[in-house]
Image: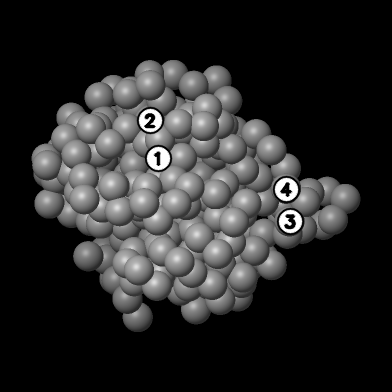
Amino acid sequence: MLAKRIIPCLDVKDGRVVKGVNFVNLRDAGDPVELAALYDQEGADELVFLDISASHEGRATMVEVVRQTAGNISIPFTVGGGIASTDDMKRLLRAGADKIGINTAALRNPKLISEGASIFGCQCIVVAMDAKYNEAWGEWEVYTHGGRNATGIKALEWARRAEELGAGELLLTSMDADGTKDGFDLKLTRAVSELVGIPVIASGGAGRTEHFHDVFTEGKADAGLAATIFHYKELSIEEVKADLRQKGVEIR
């Protein structure tokens, strides 16, 4: 079994890290370059950098901020937001990203997944999924544009297809749990994790150390991602890792 990973997420809007609840009511959480360096020092296994307004506003990810961030850390670094072509991917990889996260563009043009995997390798392509429970379906639906637009696509079907197209990893965010600090969406995470053979990063809802234990054991996730609790010093990465070690979970 692969060791579990703890990953802080930097949601960036207009050059600042922000965080909200259920994808709305955003508040400032600091400078992305400073926070990235801090998390590297504190023992984060990886970082995820998401320019959350890029797809919505139709502009490219802030390459310069990516370059500065990458220059201040030594851990793997995934960058997403507004990436619509393999040229965009190349630009960000050259700026220092280790992996590329795609969401809206992948749903609009699924071939982007296979093209990126073919050029840069499957391990480089992370497909991000924002999913919300659809009461009428009794299943989860995928959303795009930072959680603004419903797609009519079932999350489990999209997860399977993304893997088939060459995604090396899935970044799965529960919109229902996002920012609530009530725990990860274990049903959603487990359903996706048991369906695919690639690593699943669980996102949305972390509030206490035991939530990470739950998502690794019950949710079957390979990594746990969080923002609010780390940004506002409610929990440290070391506290999370110490709790996991004590409970016998293998971590990096």
| Residue under the point 61% across and 70% down | 161
For label 3, the residue is 153
The amino acid type found where label 1 is placed reads: Leu
Compared with residue 222, is residue 92 higher up or lower down, i.e. above or below?
A: above
Disc 3 crowd rating (10 Å Cα; few below 14, some 14-19, many 20+) is some
Q: Is residue 177 left or right of residue 86?
A: right
SS of the residue at dot 1?
A: strand
Per the model, the C-alpha gap separating discs 3 and 4 is 5 Å
Neighbours of disc 2 within 10 Å: few (<14), some (14-19), many (20+): many
Of label 1 and label 2, which has the lower sequence position? 2
**N-term mark: 4 or 2:** 2
Distance Cα–Cα, label 4 vs label 1: 20 Å
The residue where tag 4 is placed is 151
Q: Quadrant of residue 118?
A: bottom left
As drawn, 27 above or below 3: above
Give percent across and percent down for residue 156: 67, 65
Residue 97: x %, y % from top left = 25, 51
Viewport quadrant of the C terminus:
bottom left
**Badge 1 density bin: few <14, some 14–19, many ≥20, Cα 10 Å:** many
- Amino acid beneath label 3: Ile
Q: Are marks 1 and 2 in contact (CB under 8 Å)?
A: yes
Q: Earlier in the sequence, mark 4 or mark 1?
A: 1
The residue identified by callout 1 is: 50
- Distance from disc 1 to disc 2, alpha carbons, whole Å, reads 6 Å
Dot 3 falls on a residue whose secondary structure is strand
Residue 95 or 29: which is nearer the viewer? 95
- Residue underneath mark 2: 12
Color encoding of the figure: one colour
Mark 3 → mark 1, Cα distance in angstroms: 22 Å
Q: Secondary structure at mark 2?
A: strand
What secondary structure is marked by label 4?
Answer: strand
Q: Is residue 200 visible?
A: no
